[in-house]
Amino acid sequence: MPTSTVENYLKTIYLQQQKQRTATKTVAMGKLAKAMDVVPGTCTSMIKTLADSGLVDYKPRSGVKLTDKGQTLALHILRRHRLLELFLVEALGLDWSEVHDEAEVLEHAISDKVLERMDDYLGHPDTDPHGDPIPPAKGTHMPAPLQSLADSVEHKKLIVARIADQGREFLQFMHQHGLRPGTPITVLSHDKVVDAITVQAPDTDAVTLGMTAAGKILVRQVD
């Protein structure tokens, strides 16, 4: 069984790859070291170990990406993490703004047997409390394409799909203004001069967001 450190590296590489817009999906070592909050030398040493185990492809001058074997493990770790987050909210009543840190600890200790019992209990959900897709027990994870709220146009009706920032203060702010996954919203205005967008959810006051905040909210169009 991989160590918690190995699991964290694989999960982080996968999430960084999802942010890449290039076809190669290669993650720069400096970016990975920053995401892991370690010095570059420590990061390089671990990546070489992962490469020796067949979990990543590593090229010193270009970066690192997961092999098929590494991606399978990374998706399983994400499945554990996101099911745990949902279980902590739905079964134990924790706030969605605090479950990420708890799941970071528990994901390395839970057995597959308990994980699948949790999945059954929750009714085989597709997403976690933040709208992130839960990878299936088997198969390739192909998230549906979403757009950033920052790219939306005025008077458009949308559905909040995912909240990309899982920081506690940001999630509490989102909750305060009714901006949770599954919530319909309307774009009231998009002021490109001051880089701000004003949206409104049902039964709440309108809220104006800067583009940085709006970029952390992923939406889909109303069918």
Image: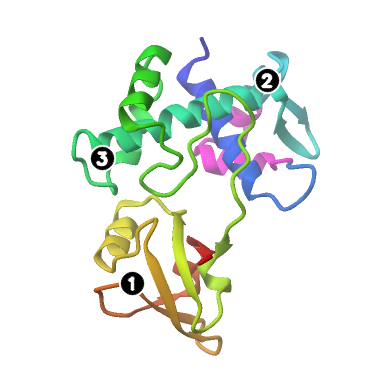
CA–CA distance in space, label 2 to label 3: 31 Å
Tell me where residue 80 appears, x and y as whole percent.
43, 27
Q: Quadrant of residue 120?
A: top left
Q: What residue type is labelled 3?
A: Val
Q: Which label sits on residue 163?
A: none
Q: Which residue lies furthest to the top in this view?
A: 1
Q: Residue furthest left?
A: 93
Q: Is residue 38 above or below residue 165?
A: above
The local crowd at label 1, few if under 14, some if 14 to 19, many if 20 or more residues have their Cα within 10 Å, is many
* Mark 3: secondary structure: helix
Q: Which amino acid does label 1 sit on?
A: Ala
Q: Which residue lies furthest to the bottom in this view?
A: 193
The local crowd at label 3, few if under 14, some if 14 to 19, many if 20 or more residues have their Cα within 10 Å, is some
The local crowd at label 2, few if under 14, some if 14 to 19, many if 20 or more residues have their Cα within 10 Å, is few
Q: Name the residue under label 3.
A: 89
Q: Mark 2 points at which residue?
A: 69
CB atoms at circles 3 and 1 under 8 Å apart? no
CB atoms at circles 2 and 3 under 8 Å apart? no
* Mark 2: secondary structure: helix
Q: Which residue is drawn at 50% across and 73% down?
A: 211
Mark 2 or mark 3, whichever is nearer to me: 3
Q: Main secondary structure of the magenta part?
A: helix
CA–CA distance in space, label 3 to label 1: 22 Å
Q: Mark 1 points at which residue?
A: 201
Q: Which amino acid does label 2 sit on?
A: Lys
CA–CA distance in space, label 1 to label 2: 42 Å
Q: What stretch is highlighted in magenta?
A: 26-44
Q: Which residue is drawn at 66% across and 29% down?
A: 44
**Lower sequence index among marks 3 and 1:** 3
Q: Which residue is drawn at 57% across and 41% down?
A: 15
